[in-house]
Image (cartoon, rainbow, N blue to C red):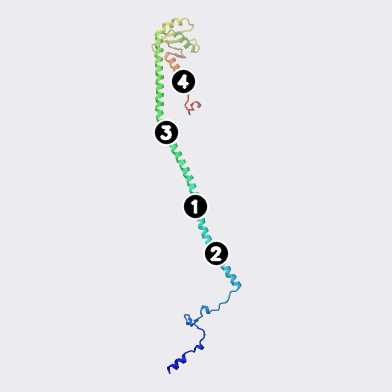
Amino acid sequence: MADSRNDRSRIPKEQLTAYERWELPLLDARGNEVPREEERDIKPLTAAELQDIHQQAEAEGHGAGLEKGHREGFAKGREEGFAQGVKAGTVEGREKGERAGREHSKQQMQALEKRIDLVMESLVLPIRQQQNELEEALVQLATAVAKAVVQRELSQDSSHIMQVVRQAMAALPSTTETVRISANPQDIEPLQASLARLDASTKLVEDAAISPGGCRVETRYSLVDFTVEKRFQQVVCALVNDASKNEPQEPGDDSSAL
């Protein structure tokens, strides 16, 4: 009995068709059957749709390429700009550094020159002062020696006193007044003999303060000092003035232009 039932549930080989696969149906959240992807009706694309897809893909590719090119170009440009900036900055920095170095060196040289000038001035100034003091001392010494020699000679021989008196009287304005002549006592006697031959009214006065060989001639309104000291002083002043005029001027001395 059992074998007859099994035979009835079997499908004869002659009735079998091609192998078919059975799968559970797909259900959504509500239990409704959802068709499978391969079971959907796929329509072939039209030429217009293909053209749209092509243009869209081309636009997307162009945009992607443009963006990529922009990124790459920006990166490359940035790199090149950085390199150029570094180069330009290096050149500019070098030039600024050189200018700053030259200016610093110039300032150092100027400061050094000023210090050297101060040192030289501190060395030369005392020498100049000593030279001036020495020159002044030599002038005073020469003046004193010459004065002593003149006074010695005049004390021994003052025979030229009359000539001195004539010069002094000639320097007076023309007058009819009595001329007062002061002279050293040792010159009075020679003067008396000589003045007696003059047509002028004169009066001799002894004055021991006047050195031999000199005189002082005066009237009520005039005075001529022909003492040895006065004439010697005038001669020395004239010599000093002539010497100062003949001295070579130092560079930068514009005193002559004043």
Circles 4 and 2 in contact, beta carbons < 8 Å: no
Upstream in sequence: badge 1 or badge 4: 1
Place of residue 97 in the rendered image (x, y in percent of width and height, measured from the top left):
46, 44
Q: In front: 198, or 46?
A: 46
**Residue pictured at 41% horizontal, 24% vertical:** 131
- Of 237 and 55, the residue lying toward us: 55
The residue that label 2 is drawn on is 63
Q: Are marks 3 and 4 in contact (CB under 8 Å)?
A: no
Dot 4: element: helix
Would you call the spot at circle 3 few (<14 residues within 10 Å), some (14-19), or many (20 or more)?
Answer: few
Residue behind mark 1: 83
Q: Residue at x 55, y 64 (%)?
A: 63
Q: Which residue is mark 4?
A: 243
Please tell me whether mark 3 sits on a helix, a strand or a loop: helix
175 is higher (above) or lower (below) than 128: above
Task: Tell me the distance, in whole angstroms, between the alpha carbons under discs 1 and 4.
Answer: 77 Å
Marks 3,1: beta carbons within 8 A = no
Mark 4 vs mark 2: give the one in front. Answer: 2
Residue type at tag 4: Ala
- The residue lying at 59 percent from left, 70 percent from top is 52
Please tell me whether mark 2 sits on a helix, a strand or a loop: helix
Quadrant in which the N terminus is drawn: bottom left
